[in-house]
Image (cartoon, rainbow, N blue to C red):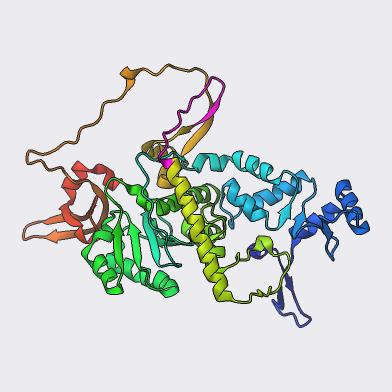
Amino acid sequence: MVELRKLRVELDVDEQGALLATLQVRPVLVERIIAAQAEDPLICTLRAEVESGIRTDCSVRNDGALMVGNRLYVPHDEALKREILEEAHSSAFAMHPGSTKMYHTLREHYWWPFMKKEIAEYVKRCLVCQQVKAERQKPSGLLQPLPIPEWKWEHLTMDFVFKLPRTRNKHDGVWVIVDRLTKSAHFLPVRANYTLNKLAQLFIDEIVRLHGVPVSITSDRDPRFTSRFWTKLHEAFGTQLQFSTAFHPQTDGQSERTIQTLEDMLRACALQFRNDWDEKLPLMEFAYNNSYQASIKMSPFDALYGKQCRTPFYWDEVGENRLEVADDVERTKEQVKIIRERLKTAQDRQKSYADNRRKDLQFEVGDWVFLKLSPWKGVVRFGKRGKLSPRYIGPYEVVEQYIPDPSHVLEEQPIELQEDLTYVEQPVQILDRKMQVLRSREIPLVKVLWRSHTVEEATWEPEDQMREQYPYLFE
C-alpha cells in the first residue's frame, strides 16, 4: 500500500467489497500546481490576457491550467518547485542525474522563468552529488574514437563493476552492456565467481533474447573476454571480438563513461537507500535509459523506440497517444541518420577537448573544497560499503596556502621481481574451502582467485600458508 501511494494511484472498492476494483492514476502533483496557479497574481493576470486574446504565447487548458506551449506553467512557489526538483533528482526513478539530463527531462512537461538556472543551482548544491560524482578530467594522449555504428544493437561495448557490497542475493558486481549507437544500456547483477558458461548464458538470456546477435563487441582486456571459451562462443555467433588498443583504453570510453554514471547512481543509492542495491538496479537502468544524452541529443529510449517511456512522475494525462506517421520505416531510417550525425559531432568535439592540455586548478584561502578519499581510507571510514563509499568528504575551508615544494614529491615504488625476472601474483578472493584427508592427518585447503586470472584458473592452496602471507583475505 505504501508503494502504491508513492506511485500516486487511487484504489476504488466496489459495493460488493472487492479488494481492488480499479487502479486509477491520480496526478496529485499536477492538481497542486493548478491549485497554486489560481493563487498566483501573475498567472491570474496572464490567464486573463490569454482569455481576452491579448497574449498568444500561452494557452488555458480545459481544466483551467495555464500552459506554455504544451508545458505546465509552475507558479512562483518555492516549496512546490523544490518538491518537483526533489522528485526529479532524488527519487528512485531519477537517481541523482546531472543538471543537463534533469533539465531536458523536466522541460518536456513543466516551465517556469529561469528554470534551467534554478535546476543547475539545485544540482550544484546537492551534497550527495558532490560526494559521489566522478572527476571529469581530460585523459592524456590522443583520443582514438571507434567507428560510428550503422544500426541499433549491432555494435556493443561492455565492462564489469565489481567489489560492490554483497547483497542478500549474493550479487557483488554489475555487468554493463551498452549499444554504441543509441547509448541504451542493460545493467545485469552478477557475482565475481560466475563461470564463463554462466556469463555466456546470461548474455544470451538478456541480450540476444531482446536484440539478437551483435556484429562486434568492444571490451577491455578483461580475462572473461580473452578466454578461449568466450572467443569460441562469439565465433559461433559470427561475432568479431574487438579489444581495446594497448595503452589506449579511451577507445572503450563509452562503457567506461556509462560505468562512471552507474557508479554515481549506485553510490547515491547506497547513501539514500542503504543496502540491497541490486533491487534498485532495474530502476537505475530505467532512469539511465530514460535520461537525456548529450551525444545524441535525446534519451536512449527515444533513440531506440522513437519516444520517451512513461513514468509515474509524468502521469498527467492517462490514455493512449496515437503516433501518426506517414511512413514509419523512413522515419526510423532518418532518425538513425540524425543520431549518427550527432555522434560524429560529439566524437569530433570530444577528441578536440581530449587532445588539449589540462587546466591548472588553483585554490585560494577561504575557498571551500572537498577532500578526495583514497580507496583504503574510503573502506576504513565507511566500512563494508567499499567501492560505493563517497568519493569525497567535506566540505572543508582552505585556511592556508603552501607553495609547492619539489622535495615533497614521492618516489616511485619499484616492482619487486624474483631472480628469474618473474613477480608473485596477488590473491583477490577465497572462493571455496575443503579438507584434504591423508593417512595420518588432514590439511585444510582454500580455493584462491588470483588477480588477472579467471575463476576456472583458481588454485587450491594450504590455508595456513595463505593466512600467514595474506591475512587480509580472511578478515
Quadrant in which residue 119 is drawn: top right
Q: What's drawn in magenta, residue-wise?
A: 354-370
Q: Nearer the viewer, residue 268 or 44?
A: 44
The residue under the point 54% across, 19% down is 365
- Residue 275 in view (yes/no): no
On the rendered image, what quadrant is the N terminus found in? bottom right
- Horizontal side of 372 relative to 308 (left or right) equals left
User: 353 above or below 11?
Assistant: above
Q: Position of residue 116 (x, y in %)?
A: 67, 45
Query: Given the current orientation, which residue lies at the most extreme right position?
Result: 52
- Residue 235 in view (yes/no): yes
The residue under the point 36% across, 49% down is 144
The residue under the point 30% across, 25% down is 410
User: Is residue 27 inside the magenta stretch?
Assistant: no
Q: Main secondary structure of the magenta part?
A: loop
User: Is residue 363 inside the magenta stretch?
Assistant: yes
Query: Given the current orientation, which residue lies at the most extreme bottom position?
Result: 16
Q: Position of residue 459 (x, y in %)?
A: 17, 56
Q: Position of residue 226 (x, y in %)?
A: 24, 59
The residue under the point 45% across, 50% down is 347
